[in-house]
Image (spheres, grey):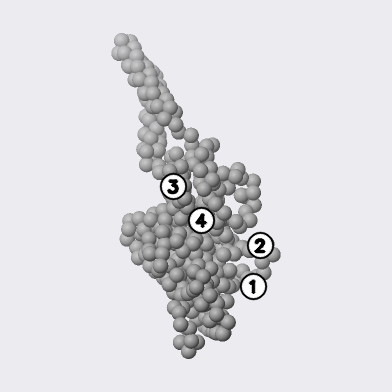
């Protein structure tokens, strides 16, 4: 902005004028100057045009940019915990009962050992997946949010 | 689904909405009003994060985390507190956390083509001409090439339409310096566009 335009105020007031953010006295001062200064008037028009372009822009948003919270009240959390504890106790009791029966029974045949190994393998796979899920749920920042 | 906190945000939104928020959106038309509010705020967070990081995937993560925090704090926001300014402040803080973790420079230009690629066709309506789209893309490419501080204040004022007081709050600067910083950013943008036209 050339100094010879005769402006007696800071140039940034022109932005304030564009944004209608000036107090009345400043606004009046800028307005009077703009009546006589084609250079500043042109700058103001350009700033208004740039602002208009920015304001009329829309950006894409990712498709999964939607959130809502799950209803996890204290009661539901407590019931989940108690439920999991009961299931754990039940699994230990059943496993103990099965182990005790196996101990008391006569030696198993080769076929029974194979069947038992197969079942044990499946159980171990299940436990592995379960442990992974538990770890993932503990480190998931968005576990209480549906996306 | 439960949307209590989103509704709280909706109640305190007020009339000042981002232009992006008011943009026609076919998907938003069929949404529950509270989901529409969530999507609107998500977009607001995403656009600022995109212009701070320059990377859509980082912007998405930051927007998600900011929205999650907004949901959790919505009911605790003070009556006169503007949720949009609160959200954008959170986006800014999360971006700085990310930069600290990744040890990256924070004030450089970002890829203009990434930003141009994120522009929605028909920004001001379906009848928008090719020429207007080109002008818009040229302006946003030039904004992307500005230093981070200038880019940030331009996005806050000229895209999100925040008041000077809100900008001061989001940026953590005195209200009296907003006008001069904004003007410096606008004149830098104007110069960059003129330079681009001269080169072309």
Residue lying at 49% horizontally and 64% vertically, measured from the top left: B157
**Relative to A60, residue A23 above or below:** below
Tell if the residue under mark 3 belongs to the same chain as the one under mark 1.
yes
Q: Chain letter of disc 2?
A: B
Disc 3 marks which residue? B78
The one nearer the camera, B17 or A93, is B17
Could you tell me which secondary element the residue under label 1 belongs to? helix
Residue B169 x, y percent position in the rendering: 41, 59
Residue in the picture at 56% in, 72% down: A48
* Along the line of sight, the residue nearer the viewer: B73 or B66: B73
Relative side of B125 to A1, left or right = right
Q: Please identify the quadrant where the C terminus of chain B is shown.
A: bottom right
Residue that numbered label 2 is attached to:
B125
Residue B83 in percent (x, y) is at 47, 51
Give the mark, 1 or 4, whose residue is nearer the N terminus: 4
Q: Estimate the spatial distance between the alpha carbons at disc 1 and disc 2, rounded to whole Å.
A: 14 Å
Does residue B147 appear in this view?
yes
Q: Which mark's residue is nearer the viewer, 1 or 4?
A: 4
Circle 1 residue = B131
Q: Is B137 situated left or right of B69 in this image?
A: right
Horizontal arrangement in the rendering, residue A10 relative to residue B159 (left or right): left
> Mark 2 falls on what kind of element?
loop
Q: Is residue B60 placed above or below A28 in the rendered structure?
A: above
Q: Is residue A133 above or below residue A42?
A: above
Mark 1 — on which chain does it sit? B
Q: Earlier in the sequence, mark 3 or mark 2?
A: 3
Q: Secondary structure at mark 3?
A: loop
A39 horizontally vs B77: left or right: right
> Which quarter of the figure has residue A73?
top left
For this orientation, the residue located farthest to the left is: A103
């Amino acid at each position: 902005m050339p100094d010879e335009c005769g402006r007696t105020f800071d140039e940034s007031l022109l932005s304030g004028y564009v944004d209608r953010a000036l107090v009345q006295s400043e606004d009046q001062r800028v307005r009077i100057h703009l009546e006589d200064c084609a250079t500043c008037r042109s700058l103001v028009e350009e700033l208004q045009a740039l602002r208009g372009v920015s304001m009329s822009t829309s950006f894409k948003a990712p498709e999964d940019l939607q959130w809502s919270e799950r209803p996890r009240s204290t009661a539901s959390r407590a019931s989940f915990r108690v439920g999991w504890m009961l299931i754990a106790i039940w699994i230990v009791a059943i496993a103990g009962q099965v182990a005790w029966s196996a101990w008391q029974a006569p030696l198993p045949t080769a076929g029974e050992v194979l069947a038992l190994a197969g079942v044990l393998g499946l159980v171990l796979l299940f436990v592995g997946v379960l442990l992974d899920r538990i770890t993932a749920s503990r480190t998931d920042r968005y576990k209480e949010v549906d996306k | 689904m439960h949307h209590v906190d989103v509704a709280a945000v909706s109640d305190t939104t007020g009339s000042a909405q981002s232009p992006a928020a008011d943009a026609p959106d076919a998907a938003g038309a069929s949404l529950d009003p509270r989901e529409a509010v969530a999507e609107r705020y998500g977009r607001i967070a995403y656009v600022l994060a995109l212009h701070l990081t320059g990377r859509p995937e980082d912007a998405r993560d930051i927007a998600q985390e900011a929205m999650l925090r907004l949901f959790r704090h919505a009911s605790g926001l003070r009556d006169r507190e503007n949720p949009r300014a609160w959200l954008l402040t959170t986006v800014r803080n999360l971006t700085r956390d990310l930069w600290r973790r990744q040890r990256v420079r924070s004030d450089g230009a970002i890829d203009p083509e990434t930003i141009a690629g994120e522009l929605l066709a028909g920004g001001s309506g379906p009848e928008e001409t090719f020429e207007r789209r080109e002008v818009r893309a040229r302006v946003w490419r030039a904004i992307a090439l500005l230093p981070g501080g200038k880019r940030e204040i331009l996005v806050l004022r000229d895209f999100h339409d925040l008041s000077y007081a809100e900008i001061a709050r989001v940026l953590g600067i005195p209200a009296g310096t907003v006008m001069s910083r904004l003007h410096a950013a606008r004149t830098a943008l104007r110069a960059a566009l003129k330079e681009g036209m001269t080169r072309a």
